[in-house]
């Protein structure tokens, strides 16, 4: 850790606290301190990610409902995306998994159900198709550029994505095909749709073997958000804030920053309700830094400035140093003093 990049106050506060580092297009992010995440400058050449083929072994027998599978396969052979609706979640999972070994595309087949936020779905898909080092976080621009030409069959069992979000997903992966399964129709961009009235209970007993277990974080993420929303309705703001502070690092480290942003916004709502200016400043610091990392430069600046002003009013020197540091790094990254021989990744942020 360079003393020229961090003040002694910040270095002392970070000692033994950093639990994760991520290399971004715009710099480096240190996660772990109670005062918030820290940005560091990082000069690098343009980045590239090595394409890989996803591995997914799924074995299932569809039994008496094989006719539906044949309809889906016929649509896919005609290079058409399709929606299957009228299914329970268990039926959706079974239907889609049964297709995984019956159709091939150039860049593979993906079964998607882990994430709840569109940006996190895209992050997960990208990391199945490209070799990404554990300490590297691809930017939105990198993810979208990397997915644009991928020819993938996406088997999507995702009940919370809206029709608009499914349309965005379809536009971001224009060369891919989608099979979406859910209880109600919402993927109106699909070339065709099949309504099922419900499968025979005995047919939904697949023997499935996947190449890896789902990420543990996603087994709990939906329950966590449901619990938080219930606390919000009950105005249990102290519990909301406590849960956000105790769990937000998990989503940050997992690189699912859409869910991280949702949690932080709930934390901000709780801080306002509790009139807790210290917690408000912390959430603004986190949201501002995250916004910049997600290429929302103006929003990131505004939120970090609000965090700094609040922390200055409170007079907590270490907290002030954290927000002042990130604000200074943001300014340095988007408006370099010298533009000659500037790396291309910084050129995008010049005003």
Image: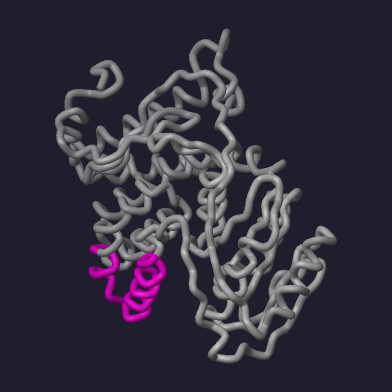
Could you tell whether 89 is left or right of 80 in the image? left
x, y percentage for residue 97?
57, 68
Q: Quadrant of the C terminus?
A: top right
The answer to whether residue 60 is above or below residue 43 is below
x, y percentage for residue 7?
23, 23
What range of the chain is rendered magenta?
219-242
The answer to whether residue 271 is above or below residue 1 is below
Q: Quadrant of the N terminus?
A: top left
x, y percentage for residue 77?
81, 61
Could you tell whether 274 is left or right of 134 in the image? left
Please tell me which residue is depicted at 30% across the width and 46% down the height of the picture. Answer: 310
The answer to whether residue 297 is above or below residue 118 is above
Please tell me which residue is depicted at 59% across the width and 75% down the height of the picture. Answer: 61
Prevalent SS, magenta region: helix
Closer-to-camera residue (236/54): 54
Location of residue 340 by image quarter: top right
Q: Within the magenta stretch, is there residue 233?
A: yes
């Amino acid at each position: 850790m360079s003393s020229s990049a961090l003040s002694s106050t910040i270095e002392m506060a970070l000692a033994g606290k950093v639990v994760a580092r991520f290399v971004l297009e715009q710099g480096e992010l240190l996660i772990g301190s109670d005062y918030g995440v820290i940005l560091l400058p990082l000069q690098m050449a343009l980045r590239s990610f090595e394409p890989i083929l996803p591995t997914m072994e799924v074995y299932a027998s569809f039994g008496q409902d094989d006719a539906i599978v044949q309809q889906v396969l016929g649509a896919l052979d005609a290079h058409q995306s399709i929606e299957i609706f009228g299914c329970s979640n268990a039926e959706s999972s079974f239907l889609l998994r049964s297709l995984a070994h019956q159709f091939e595309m150039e860049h593979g087949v993906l079964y998607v159900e882990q994430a709840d936020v569109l940006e996190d779905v895209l992050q997960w898909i990208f990391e199945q198709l490209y070799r990404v080092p554990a300490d590297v976080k691809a930017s939105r621009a990198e993810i979208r550029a990397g997915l644009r030409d991928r020819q993938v069959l996406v088997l999507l069992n995702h009940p919370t994505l809206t029709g608009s979000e499914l349309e965005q997903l379809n536009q971001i992966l224009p060369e891919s095909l989608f099979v979406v399964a859910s209880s109600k129709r919402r993927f109106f961009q699909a070339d065709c749709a099949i309504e099922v009235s419900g499968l025979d209970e005995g047919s939904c007993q697949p023997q499935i073997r996947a190449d890896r277990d789902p990420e543990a974080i996603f087994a709990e993420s939906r329950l966590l958000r449901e619990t938080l929303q219930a606390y919000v309705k009950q105005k249990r703001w102290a519990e909301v804030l406590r849960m956000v502070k105790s769990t937000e690092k998990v989503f940050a480290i997992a690189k699912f920053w859409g869910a991280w942003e949702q949690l932080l916004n709930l934390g901000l709502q709780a801080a306002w309700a509790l009139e807790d200016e210290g917690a408000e400043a912390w959430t603004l610091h986190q949201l501002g830094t995250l916004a910049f990392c997600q290429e929302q430069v103006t929003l990131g600046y505004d939120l970090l400035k609000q965090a700094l002003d609040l922390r200055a009013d409170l007079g907590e020197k270490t907290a002030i140093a954290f927000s002042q540091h990130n604000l200074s790094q943001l300014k340095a990254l988007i408006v370099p003093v010298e533009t000659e021989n500037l790396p291309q990744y910084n050129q995008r942020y010049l005003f």
